[in-house]
Image (cartoon, grey):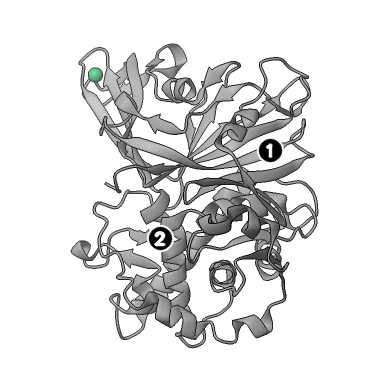
């Protein structure tokens, strides 16, 4: 069984997460920074929309529901952007970043500023619903990564990885630039995006808004079966990529992911205590659960005989409330589902992405420029099928869970 927890950025997990930026005057500075924003962007509104009518009095105060225009097979990008926008802790921190960088002179355009501009454009929109064109952001993605430069169908999970890594890189550069200038790592410009662990005098790993929202820590324990010594190694992760099986559940897929593996034969483990190769038991556990747990179902499998990827339409049931139990050191750790990126289509190279998102207790369906009210039971239609060739081609692909009871 392949175990590929996605490992990104920092080699060592941050020891402490501290100095969450105060949000205080965030919105005021956000509003002032954004004056003139609307002159520069074209926004297509649609009167009092169907969505507003459908929500009526239930329309949450201050919330916005905007579709995203498609720029030639950019649904992989739109579906992930909607999940990120409706991920409250991420959105709040990105808007704080926006307010700060808009008030800082000579910030060059990059993928993060384009993303922050897009979020601000939606948040500050006069209308409560409509469609925005994420043109600058998409252009930036294409400029930055040749993988996304063509107009072909892309993998939403690859895009998710690329985006997170890119944001971290940008914030790391911001921080090192700020460190090299006469003053100092406490400057507001830096602290809103990324913060060094001040306990280590700025030497420790950088904690960015991506780390604060999505980073968890896995611990990898290997027990030598000869001397019984346990060696533990920590690995940070931003999502878990799990193998899927037919007629299974997310919990059983996770149990497989975290199950004990026996290292023997050619896979023996070099034990430092025995100074030789030994049989061993290896298992993983979540040492620190992330605030937002992102799970990627590996539905695109490389088939050697075909020498190409094949889509697995397996039925995998995912719960609204996910308990990690013994998979996590904090056995009471619980999560609630708030977004699903759905792949539509029977092959990895064609198809479409949409997202189902929970916002203020309502479920919505986001399909590029279209936003509609949905129902919780609709999510069941994206579990997959127990038979191959069933005609149902819409499958949950990336799942976003928010931790209940506050972050650890
Ligand atoms: Zn040993």
Per the rendering, the mark at residue 343 is: 1
Work out whether residue 268 or residue 126 is closer to the camera in this orientation and state it. Answer: 126
Q: Mark 2 and ligand 1: say if the CB distance to the nearest ligand atom is below 8 Å.
A: no
Above or below, 296 against 83 in this view is above
Across and down, in percent, residue 113 comes to 55, 72
Across and down, in percent, residue 209 comes to 40, 60
Query: For residue 387, what is the image quadrant?
Result: top right
Residue reaching furthest to the front: 57
Work out whether residue 256 or residue 172 is closer to the camera in this orientation and state it. Answer: 256
Work out whether residue 394 or residue 138 is closer to the camera in this orientation and state it. Answer: 394
Q: Residues within 10 Å of mark 1 (few under 14, many from 20)?
A: many
Per the rendering, the mark at residue 267 is: none
- As helix, strand or loop, the secondary structure at mark 1 comes to strand
Q: Is residue 155 visible?
A: no
C-alpha span from label 1 to label 2: 27 Å
Q: Residue at x 48, y 74 (%)?
A: 98
Query: For residue 302, what is the image quadrant?
Result: top right
Across and down, in percent, residue 377 comes to 58, 32
Write down which quadrant ligand 1 falls in. Answer: top left
The residue under label 2 is: 209
- As helix, strand or loop, the secondary structure at mark 2 comes to helix
């Amino acid at each position: 069984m392949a175990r590929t927890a996605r490992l990104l950025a920092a080699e060592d997990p941050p020891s402490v997460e501290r100095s969450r930026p105060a949000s205080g005057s965030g919105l005021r500075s956000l509003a002032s920074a954004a004056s003139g924003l609307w002159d520069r962007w074209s926004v297509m509104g649609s009167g009092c929309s169907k969505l507003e009518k459908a929500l009526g009095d239930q329309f949450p105060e201050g919330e916005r529901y905007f579709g995203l225009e498609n720029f030639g097979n950019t649904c992989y990008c739109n579906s992930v952007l909607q999940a990120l926008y409706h991920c409250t802790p991420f959105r709040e921190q990105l808007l704080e970043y926006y307010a700060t960088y808009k008030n800082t002179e000579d910030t060059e355009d990059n993928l993060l500023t384009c993303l922050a501009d897009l979020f601000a454009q939606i948040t500050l929109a006069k209308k409560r619903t409509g469609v925005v064109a994420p043109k600058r952001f998409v252009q930036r993605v294409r400029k930055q990564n040749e993988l996304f430069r063509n107009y072909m169908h892309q993998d939403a999970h690859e895009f998710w990885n690329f985006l997170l890594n890119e944001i971290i890189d940008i914030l790391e550069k911001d921080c090192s630039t700020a460190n090299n200038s006469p003053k100092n790592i406490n400057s507001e410009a830096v602290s809103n995006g990324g913060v060094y662990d001040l306990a280590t005098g700025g030497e420790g790993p950088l904690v960015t808004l991506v780390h604060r929202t999505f980073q968890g820590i896995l611990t990898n324990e290997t027990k030598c079966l000869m001397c019984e010594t346990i060696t533990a190694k920590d690995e940070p992760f931003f999502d878990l990529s799990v193998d899927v099986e037919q007629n299974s559940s997310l919990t059983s897929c996770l149990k497989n992911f975290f199950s004990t593996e026996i290292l023997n034969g050619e896979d023996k483990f070099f034990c430092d205590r025995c100074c030789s190769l030994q049989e061993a038991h290896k298992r993983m556990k979540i040492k620190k659960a992330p605030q937002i747990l992102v799970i990627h179902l590996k539905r695109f499998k490389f088939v050697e005989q075909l020498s190409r990827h094949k889509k697995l339409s397996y039925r995998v049931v995912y719960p609204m409330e996910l308990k990690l139990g013994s998979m996590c050191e904090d056995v009471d750790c619980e999560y609630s589902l708030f977004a699903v990126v759905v792949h539509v289509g029977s092959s990895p190279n064609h198809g479409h992405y949409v997202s189902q998102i929970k916002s203020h207790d309502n479920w919505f369906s986001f399909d590029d420029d279209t936003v509609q009210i949905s129902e919780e039971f609709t999510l069941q239609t994206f579990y997959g099928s127990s038979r191959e060739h069933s005609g149902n081609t819409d499958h949950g692909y990336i799942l976003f869970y928010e931790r209940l009871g506050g972050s650890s």
